[in-house]
Amino acid sequence: MPEPSALSLIPPAVVLVLAIWLRRPIFALIIGAVAGLLLISPEQALGNFSDISLKVMQDETIGWLILVCGSFGALIALLVRTGGALAFGRSALKLCKGRRSSLLMTCVLGLVIFIDDYLNALTVGETMKRVTDRFKISREMLAYVVDSTAAPVCVLVPLSTWAVFFGGLLESNGVADAGQGVSVYMQAIPYMFYAWLSVILVILVCMGVVPAFGPMRKAENLARHGSAGAMHVGEFAPEHNYSMKAVEAEMEHADKEGGKLYNFLAPLLFLVAATVYFDIDVWKGMLATLVFIVPFYLIQRLMPMSEMFEEMMDGFKTMLPAIGTVIAAFVFKEVCDQLHLSLYVIDSLKPYMTPQMMPAIVFLSMAILAFATGSSWGIFAVTIPIVMPLAHALDADIPLVLGALLSASAFGSQACFYSDSTVLAAQGSGCDLISHAVTQLPYALIAASLAFVGFLLMA
């Protein structure tokens, strides 16, 4: 195992450059992983890549993600095929009279579905994209609103999967007593500056108080002057241009006239309720929803059983690009762990840590790590055992340090080009991944900069 060094920064740099240049995130992540393995041991790179990829595919989290994302794709296919999605769009248009109201409705849905960022990202984007299309809102803007109300909202709510995960992490590392993890987590919520600022900023953008700027402005202009309701990514990803033909193809087999609103709302409400019932377990909630939806549609004779399963398989396939990106990101994260990237960053910044400056430095360093690795959860399982004992040794404000850690986690989840939340927000919104990442990054950086200033002021 190599010692922590500046060489560990090379793989993340390779990934970021290739992802922006080639607009192929899976390829960029694989090349970044290979570059890291060559740094570790050139002669064993092939064997190490084989071992790491097998380890990742055997990971329970990856299995869970494949099942959840694939089954969600199956559910979406049924919602579209029965005409329920179109019925929702028609009903939503009665409430949404223009760009501002449709974006605000998207934002409200994101705030309501707070139990899990995966569930949020996939559900809100799929629910609203045909509504925002009608008002010529770019898919990039939709994806930004969806992404900004996914992880940043989930991290602020103590009933979400984030609170459960990090609460358990705090208990297992001795930061909180047994059974008190979520309680300690709640003490840090007021100090999760990035999450608060990100939510406030997206609301201001939806209201039109903060105008679109930078790459987002270009995307919005292209959407406004393009085909009605279509998303155009122009120079950001010409190979993934969306047009009305793409939207029409998606709805080609949908029941455009007989679709009923309850065939859309009932499964989604059941999904949220079942997920809560099963202690915020999205996979169990999804299983229960599929068990509910099949007889629910069969009783109405909407389609034969064989056709229903064909639609579900087609829907599963639509999620493969997102699943592939997240798997590649996990492989890349494993390579970064072997290069001790997190240890190098923390060791480099440790001399500057004082009780007053520690929250700001922790936020900055963890934000860089989460952005570089695309791991909003995994990286903190590695760094909390390092950061928290240091915080106790320096007699730093523990809730404030935890707030900085969770703020950095939310930033990494939203801003990283290949994080699971970013991938799923783009997938659910029907937006090219790199276009979504490039257009939302300036907004994420604004919120992160203000959060960093906030931690400095607290010092």
Image (cartoon, grey):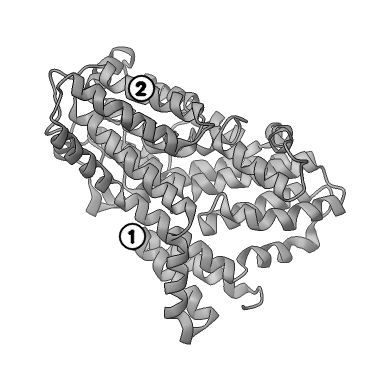
What residue lies at 14% left-to-right and 18% top-to-bottom? 258
- Of residue 238 and residue 253, the one placed in the foreground of this image is 253
Q: Mark 2 points at which residue?
A: 102
What residue lies at 61% left-to-right and 51% top-to-bottom? 367
Instruction: Report the amino acid beneath label 1.
Output: Arg
User: Which quarter of the image is occupied by the N terminus?
Assistant: bottom right
Residue 127 in percent (x, y) is at: 33, 28
Q: How crowded is mark 2: few (under 14 residues within 10 Å), some or many (20 or more)?
A: many
Residue 138 in percent (x, y) is at: 31, 36
**221 horizontally vs 201: left or right:** left
**307 horizontally vs 330: left or right:** left
Q: How crowded is mark 1: few (under 14 residues within 10 Å), some or many (20 or more)?
A: some
Q: In this view, does 17 lie above or below 139?
A: below
Q: Residue 24 carries which label?
A: 1
| Residue 408 in view | yes
Q: In this view, does 146 lie above or below 215?
A: above
What residue lies at 44% left-to-right and 27% top-to-bottom? 274
**236 horizontally vs 457: left or right:** left
| Residue 206 in view | no
Query: Toward which corner of the image does residue 378 lie, by quadrant?
Result: bottom right
- Of residue 186 and residue 458, the one placed in the foreground of this image is 186
**291 horizontally vs 249: left or right:** right
Residue 304 in percent (x, y) is at: 13, 30
Instruction: Report the amino acid beneath label 2.
Output: Ser
User: Which quarter of the image is occupied by the C terminus?
Assistant: top right
Name the element at disc 1: loop
What residue lies at 84% left-to-right and 50% top-to-bottom? 392
Return the disc, 1 or 2, that comes first in the chain's sequence: 1
